[in-house]
Structures are given as structure tokens and as C-alpha cells.
Image: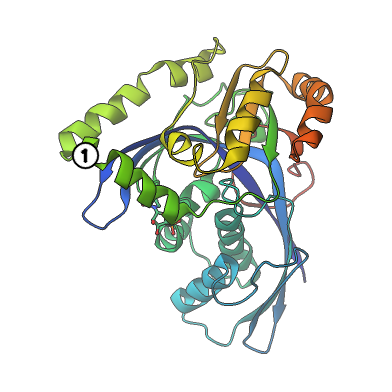
Amino acid sequence: MTITVVAPAKINLHLEVLGLRPDGYHELAMVMQTLDLADRLLCTPTADGRITLVCDAPGLSTGGDNLVVRAAELLRRRAALPELGARIELGKRIPIGAGLAGGSSDGAATLVGLNALWGCGFGAADLLAMAAELGSDMPFCLEGGTRLCFGRGERLEPALPPAGDGLPASEQAVGVRPGLGVLLIKHPQASVSTPWAFGRCRELRGDFYLERESDFEQRRQALRQGPLVAALASGAALPPLRNDLQAVVEPEVASVGEGLRLLRQAPQVLAVAMSGSGPSLFALFADAAAATAAHGRLAADLAAAGFEAWCCRCRAGGASLETSGTTP
Ligand code: C5P
């Protein structure tokens, strides 16, 4: 038996660095959004007790440092079934090292896929706890949709009230603003290390970091009740998006400033920002058709500047078993 798991990318609609935590991580306030740009994992059980990862992206490690392998090993340890094995074929479509949580989403998809394939029987709360051990973004990658993410990024809250009854489950979500189109770009030669970006942020802004939990909570509340969440819920005009790491990365990675400048020229663009620690950049549009039209208008300039581009949409839901009708 082989099962297929879909591992969608995410973008950050808001990334605010609040301060430093006792564990050395940064305390964050974010809004994350799942895209319908996704990797796929084909998982097949084996009887040899080995976890084997093969991948169609040259240069991506398939060893014990890959989050797919780490997730499979953690799940097997927690299930206390060391004899279980699996072969996982990873089809990459999400750009690597881009701030789109491709690696985290692959790891989250591995938890979902092997939990089903091996019949481990872990519930959603167990998988979320394992995901949080493996990476700060990984719980979001399991849940997906539009979420407020606090703490290291692993504390999730719905950003929007659930949509009304009567909609298909895939759209009922805790919210995706229906139809939001996305033009995503990345320079293939640019990559940013997340630890470097946070380290540089600390050097530049550390004196201004908040320290008290009450101050963190005040910022969380400002985000919950602020204009971005209100606009996502109501369909009103989006405010400018905030990513504190953008100001850190932009002076160091030439393509970031250039790409933002190009995206801001797109017709009918609603908002533009860097995702995560970059260097991928995105522009939002009212629907997929507007994103595609903007891509058409900018294609020559983007290609001349060396950018790769993808048109996609915001979607509900995170890493999930592929069934007909849920394929992005
Ligand atoms: O949790 P994860 O392994 O994805 O984080 C990668 C790195 O990013 C961490 O080692 C840390 O340097 C940085 N980070 C941080 N604060 C966070 C999340 C990540 O400083 N909230």
C-alpha cells in the first residue's frame, strides 16, 4: 500500500519579533497562511526497519538531518515500534531555503502519512506535540489555514471565526479569505539561513526587545484586534504587511529589495512582503486571475532580474492525506 500526503507551503502575512525567550528562541507574533503550492510525499511501508528518503530535488539532503527522516524516527520512537520501516519519495515543488516552510511542511506531512500508514493511532494533539519538538513552524504546517502563531511560532490560534455552515469542509476553515491570489517570487541564487536572520535581528534590534510577558501579551492582543485580522475577516482593504525580518534581510540580500520593488508595480496588487526569514517574496491579489494577470505583466522584468515565479492561492488546511477533491 502506498499513500500520498500533500505538504503545502506557507507565507507570513505578519511577522513581529517581540523579544528573546529564556530558551534562546525569539518570542514571535505572526499570522501565517497556507498556500496551494505543495510538495508531495509517497509513503510505502517496508519490513526492513529502515526509513529511506528519496527526493527529486538535487542537493537536498536525504539523511538524518532532513525533517522527513527526523519526523519518521520520532513517530516510530513514540509508537515504540522500532521494527517499522518506510520508503518515502519526496516530490519537491516548494522552493528550498525560501522562508516558505517547505522542510517543516514535509516533516508535518511525514507525521500525518506515517501515522496513517503504520496505524500508530496518534491523535491530533499528539501529532502537534511531536511537531513542536521538531520545529517552530511545524505545528502550523499540520493545522494550516490562516492562523495567529505565538511563542516560538508553535502556539496557534484561529485568526478568523469559522465560516458558516453549508460550505464544503475544505472551505469551512478557520479561515482562508476565499480566493486570495498570490504571486510568489524567489531568486534561485539567494538563500537565507533562518538562525542567521534571527541572530542579525538580535544584533540590530536587541536593545528594543520587549522582556515582560505582559508586554508580549499586549502585542498579541494588538494583533488579534488589529487591522490585518479585521481585513482578512471582512474582505476590507489589507493594511501594509509587517515582517520584522525583512528590514534585517533586505540590506544583505540584493534580490529582496529588487523583487519587492517589482512586485509593488503589479497591477491591482493588494499587499507585498517577504515571507518568513526570506528570501522569497509575495504579492497578494483579490483572486487567482488577478495574480496570473500581474505575473503576465511582470514576467519579462522578473525574468530579466533572474527571478523564478509561481502563481498560487491561499488555501485552508495543512499537511493532509491526498484524497480526491483535496489536491491543491
Ligand atoms: O525551530 P526551528 O528549528 O525551525 O528554528 C530554526 C532557528 O531559527 C532556531 O535555531 C533559531 O536560531 C531561530 N528561531 C528563533 N526564534 C524562533 C524560531 C526560530 O530564534 N521563534
**Which image quarter: residue 116?**
bottom right
Which residue matches tag 1? 207
Residue 309 vertical placement versus 54 (above, below): above
Residue closest to the eye, 73 or 116: 73
- Residue at x-position 75% and y-position 66%: 58
Q: Amino acid at mark 1?
A: Asp
Q: Is residue 199 in view from this perspective?
A: yes
In this rendering, does residue 180 appear at all?
no
State the residue in front, 117 or 213.
213
Taking the image as shown, residue 105 lies to the left or right of residue 308, namely left
Query: Residue 274: x, y in percent?
Result: 55, 35
Q: Quadrant of residue 106?
A: bottom right
Image height of 314 relative to 54, above or below: above
**Crowding near the residue tagged with mark 1, few <14, some 14–19, many ≥20 C-alpha atoms within 10 Å:** few
Q: x%, y% of residue 167?
A: 65, 25
Q: Secondary structure at mark 1?
A: helix
Question: In this rendering, is residue 214 above or below 85?
Answer: above
